[in-house]
Amino acid sequence: MASPLRRHAKLWIPLAFIAAAAVAVWFVAVPAESDGDPDYRDPTLPVAERVADLLDRMTIEEKAGQMTQVAVDAVQGDAVAERGIGSLLNGGSDALHDTPEDWAAMIDGRQEQALDTRLGIPLIYGLDAVHGNASLPGATIFPHNIGLGAAGDPDLTERAAQITAAETRVAGVHWTFSPCLCVVRDSRWGRTYESFGEDPELVSQMATAVTGYQGEDLSADTSVLATAKHYVGDGGTAYGTSETEDYLLDQGVAELSEAELRRLHLAPFEAAVDAGVGSVMVSYSSNDLGDGPIKAHADSYLITDVLKGELGFDGIVLSDWQGVDQISLDYAESVRTAINAGIDMVMVPFEYERFIDTLLDEVEAGHIGTDRIDDAVDRILTKKFELGLFEDPYADTGNADLVGSPEHRAVAREAAAASQVLLQNDGDLLPLTGEESLYIAGSGADALGRQLGGWSGAWQGTVEGVGEGTTVLEGIQEAAPGADVEFSEDASAPVVDRDVGIVVVAEDPYAEGVGDAGAGDHDMRLSGVDAAAVDTVCGAMDCAVIVLSGRPIEIGADRLDAIDALVAAWLPGSEGTGVADPLFGVTPYTGTLPVTWPARVSDEPVNVGDPDYDPLFAYGSGIQT
């Protein structure tokens, strides 16, 4: 019998030629790396040179992967390496893990897959740390932006962002989808509390959050990449009706002139670009500047001409969650339109195979130019280099003990106190002495979840709350240890022999869409239980009503007459003692309204400067003590 070698001898020569040809094709398709360490691995070179070197070595498949951001739970097997996925995120602010070390281990595991590829390009991981790293149980949670707008202190906003960045990066996360620089023009919008206010000048001043997040050195273990969102006009979407909906706010249409869009909604993004913001997230909404509505994700004029050209933004333009899908029923057309409009990275977030394959098909067909792809990947790689991920791709959890530390919580308490707005104070009831006998009621008095609001441990938040914190009731007991306190949430306990009543009313948590007035249970009015508690307590004694809400709510004129003191506490975060501090004169009331407070929900939209402006409390109102 002939040997195996001799039996296949005739096949060996043609197979050798085939193998040689395959190698030749590989070196044509995949740019060859030079001997030794490539330039992109040299940290002494300028970032621009490193990016250019790496970009020149990449295949079109590798570039497409870098433009893809995927929900971490959707990634199957070794897909990070096999498809060269450039970014991961977790949806909303879901608390996927309990400790910074657990978070870091999960992200590092995915990072290891990314590094085990031909070029070893690291992942960038993002999440919605919008008022603290609320995905991490025990983290310090600050007031939502509307409260920081009420405080009106750009330095305080910057310090809150610095702490959030430190408590986010320590968990292995490199990128926060914050700050929201929307200018809210109708408080029926469920995202009202994500805005710093209705005045573009105020919102622009709070772009200090960008420098707070990013710090002086983006590669530091206390810095994260910031995201200015949602570009542009989402705070100006109109309320109306359609065949299928009785409200059109979230993801709706802003109908205004280009001059109005620039004056009201573009200005804060210009401030963010000037501050060096690293990324901008595009809005779900559309703008109608007079020629019909155009989806923001499809608007090449506003993204490429204005943002990248006129404003000189050189960072990453990121889509919102499945936002590209909304452009057209034809998925290929959606991808083609979005990328050509100037979107650099697409938050897929699930069907990453479909997105990558579609993007590659569109490039091969000539519908998306390679120059556009290279521009997008250049921007993405630049931020990865600036974040130091090529030198230090894994998490540094050495400062894990800073998460929720007393020092951090002290700043959150300061921010909560500064955000309190005293709207009514008949007979100078406030501040209290701290020696009174108190009757405390209301759904917000002892409910951490209600004072945290949405984007806290879950996208829509939870009534139960997550993590650690001090409720308003606990804060009162801490700030006024000499007070004699009786608590009855629904005011069912007898209201006798008490000096002062304090009723803490609250909205249940919500976020975008669900929170739109008219979309469900969130109607911007007192709940029946809270209304009854106010009537009972304020009908029996001097009383203060504290409102925990993401926006103004309708109190009722008759009810207001019975209230001695009214405080807008917004969504103060994890430190309820900050609500109690000005209540007892530990700190003064200094906050002012960042949005107009109408007498009735039906008065919306109402903004300072409107004709016939006649609100219950005007923009900028706030009694100082």
Image (spheres, grey):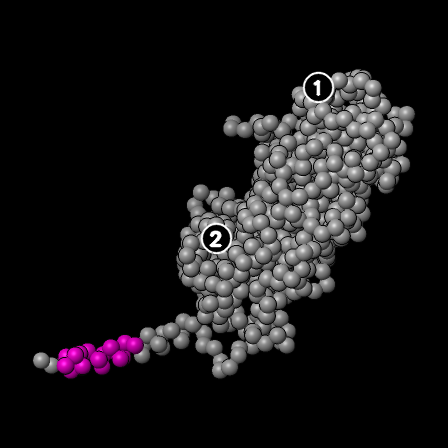
Q: Residue 4 lies in magenta, yes or no?
A: yes
Q: Nearer the viewer, mark 2 or mark 1?
A: 1
Q: Is residue 2 magenta?
A: no
Q: Which label number is shown at residue 492? A: 1
Q: What element carries label 2?
A: helix
Q: In which quarter of the image is residue 142?
A: top right
Q: Say which quarter of the image contains residue 584.
A: top right
Please tell me which residue is depicted at 83% across the width and 22% down the height of the picture.
498
Image point 54% across, 52% down: which residue?
89
The dominant secondary structure in magenta is: helix
In the picture, measured across the screen, residue 136 lies left or right of residue 596, that is: left
> Is residue 191 something one can see in this rendering?
yes
Between 580 and 388, the one nearer to me in the picture: 580
Whether tag 2 and tag 1 are in contact, CB under 8 A, the answer is: no
Residue at 74%, 33% in the rendered image: 473
* Residue 465 left/right relative to 568: left
Q: Quadrant of the C terminus?
A: top right
Q: What stretch is highlighted in magenta?
A: 3-19
**Most distant residue in the left direction:** 1
Mark 1 secondary-structure assignment: loop
Residue type (three-letter) at the residue carrying disc 1: Ser
Of the residues under marks 2 and 1, which one precedes in the sequence? 2
Q: Mark 2 points at which residue?
A: 336
